[in-house]
Image: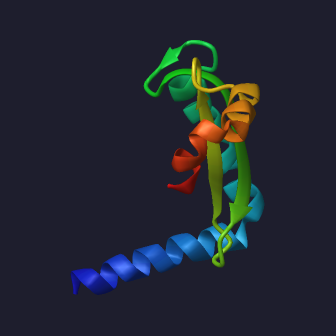
Amino acid sequence: MELLADLRERYDRIALSTMDPVSSAIFFHREISLFFDKYVNTGQESIFGKISHYYATVETNERGSLHLHGLLWLDGNMRLPNLVDDMANPAEEGYRAQ
């Protein structure tokens, strides 16, 4: 019986979000903004370490729920010019093969 109640609750939540996409988008924006403000802290120490840059894109799944795909670039990590040079270096061929 608890399984049916759980399924009904999930169904109701999905139905509500698809019936009111503006409220869902506002809620999603608020939650993601708080996440980046409180946990990512670009340029400062955070729970992930010191993040120098980040990139994220938002999309919907087949149920219409918003979600985010992103990349956090750690400060002091490889820089793009170093990465390109390392990839062109013949001594790194074994590493590239992995």
Q: Where is residue 77 shown, x and y percent of the image?
A: 58, 24
* Up-down relation of residue 69 to residue 8 (above or below): above
Q: How many marks?
A: 0
Picture quarter with the N terminus: bottom left
- Residue 86 placement (x, y as % from top left): 66, 33
Give the colouring mode of the picture.
Answer: rainbow
Image vertical order of residue 50 relative to residue 84, above or below: above
Outermost residue toward the front?
A: 90
- Say left or right for 58 vs 73: right
Q: In this rendering, is residue 87 above or below 17?
A: above
The part of the image, by quadrant, that contains residue 17 is bottom right
Viewer-closest of 22 and 91: 91
Name the foreground residue: 22 vs 50. 50
The residue at the point 59 percent across, 37 percent down is 91
Name the image quarter holding residue 85: top right
Residue drawn at 64 percent across, 52 percent down:
68
**Relative to 36, is 42 above or below?**
above
Q: Residue at x 68, y 40 (%)?
A: 87
In terms of depth relative to the viewer, which is nearer, 59 or 15?
Answer: 59
Residue 80 percent coordinates (x, y) = 73, 30
Taking the spot 57% from the left edge, 12% from the top edge, the residue there is 44
On the image, the x and y values in percent for residue 98 come to 50, 55
Residue 80 visible within the image: yes
Residue 31, image quadrant = top right
The furthest residue to the top: 44
Is residue 32 visible in the rendered image? The answer is no
Q: Residue furthest left?
A: 1
